[in-house]
Amino acid sequence: MQSAMTSPSIVSARPVEPLEGEIERWVQLRRNRTSWLLLIPALLVMLVAAIAPLVTILWVSFWSVEGLNLVRTFDVGTWEQVAQDPTFYRLAWSTLRTVIIVLFLVGTLGLIAGYFLARFVTNRKLQALLLMLAILPFWTSYLIRIITWQPLFGNSGVINFFLEKLGLPKMELFLFNDRAMIFAMTTLYVVFVIGPVFWALSRIDPEVIAASRSLGASAWTTFRTVELPLARGGLIVGLFFASIFLFGDYATGRLIGGGTNPMLSDAISQYAGSGQWPVAAALAVVLFVLAMIMLAIFMRIYDLRTEL
């Protein structure tokens, strides 16, 4: 009698678990579909703004020029020209050399400035003011910032004017050479490192630093073994963004460097201006590959996905 009363309840309870599992799977499937639908706008933006231009540039690099006409054919002649001309190798080496030097200077100065703001400037309002002053030049046009160097550092510029009034010898020509170009690039892009380094150092728990000092470590040892590894993410992020702008910068080398140390970006601009679009596209592909190699190095040093 008891088994007859309990058996219906057992039989009726058995289909409940499969039904709940089906509901959970249906809900999960709907969430996955919703996630893909939410990704569609971002994927479209990536396709239109990034992938399509890169594919187009690669395609154009296989075209040819006949007179003043651009012929849409698949011709490897442009790539053979790039591979056989030593000028292109010198341009690639000049670009890498300039980027590495500027990144070293930007990283060093940005690390020093960020450390100073995070550790020696305790007033929050003063920190915000100094960061704002560092970012303030970026509120103006890039070309305006570049052009202002000419009346400032030229032979008849403002600095030499005041030196002459003070009875001091004039400064040597600071424009139209490698030194001027590297110095200008450093001052332009150091702000990309100051901010991330400052925020990375500000997130470090003061008790961690105090524990290191209490164990007998000097200020330099604490910085080298504790603070710098913890702030490495901010430093790498800043260098990453600075390198992106450096690879594409051609105005600084032309207006400040005077073309004495041409880079790939400058050559791309000149070839495109003269109608040699296949050569310009091929050099753009080479420049993109160099930038990707630099990004891979940064990713090898530090996983940027944890900071971006």
Image (cartoon, rainbow, N blue to C red):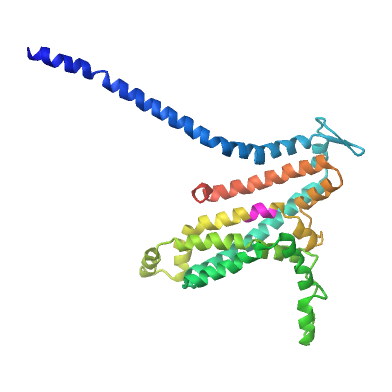
Residue 228 visible:
no
Instruction: Note whether 221 is above or below 52 in the view shown.
Output: below
For this rendering, which residue is in front, 110 or 146?
146
Instruction: Note whether 189 is above or below 32 in the view shown.
Output: below
For this rendering, which residue is in front, 103 or 184?
184
Region rendered in magenta: 242-246
For this rendering, which residue is in front, 94 or 157?
157
Q: Quadrant of the N terminus?
A: top left
Q: Does residue 244 belong to the magenta stretch?
A: yes
Q: Is residue 182 left or right of residue 134?
A: right
Residue 43 visible:
yes
Q: Position of residue 138 (x, y in %)?
A: 65, 62
**Tag count:** 0
For this rendering, which residue is in front, 137 or 234?
137
Please, which residue is most extreme toward the right here?
Answer: 67
User: Quadrant location of residue 148?
Assistant: bottom right
User: Quadrant location of residue 78?
Assistant: top right
Q: Position of residue 115 (x, y in %)?
A: 52, 67
Q: Is residue 87 left or right of residue 188?
A: right
Q: Residue at x 62, y 39 (%)?
A: 46
Q: Residue at x 55, y 70 (%)?
A: 129
Q: Residue at x 73, y 36 (%)?
A: 56
Q: Position of residue 307 (x, y in %)?
A: 51, 51
User: Quadrant location of residue 168?
Assistant: bottom right
Q: Is residue 188 left or right of residue 228?
A: right
Instruction: Note whether 263 is above or below 51 in the view shown.
Output: below
Q: Position of residue 160 (x, y in %)?
A: 78, 79
Type of secondary structure dominating the magenta stretch = helix
Please, which residue is most extreme toward the bottom here?
Answer: 167
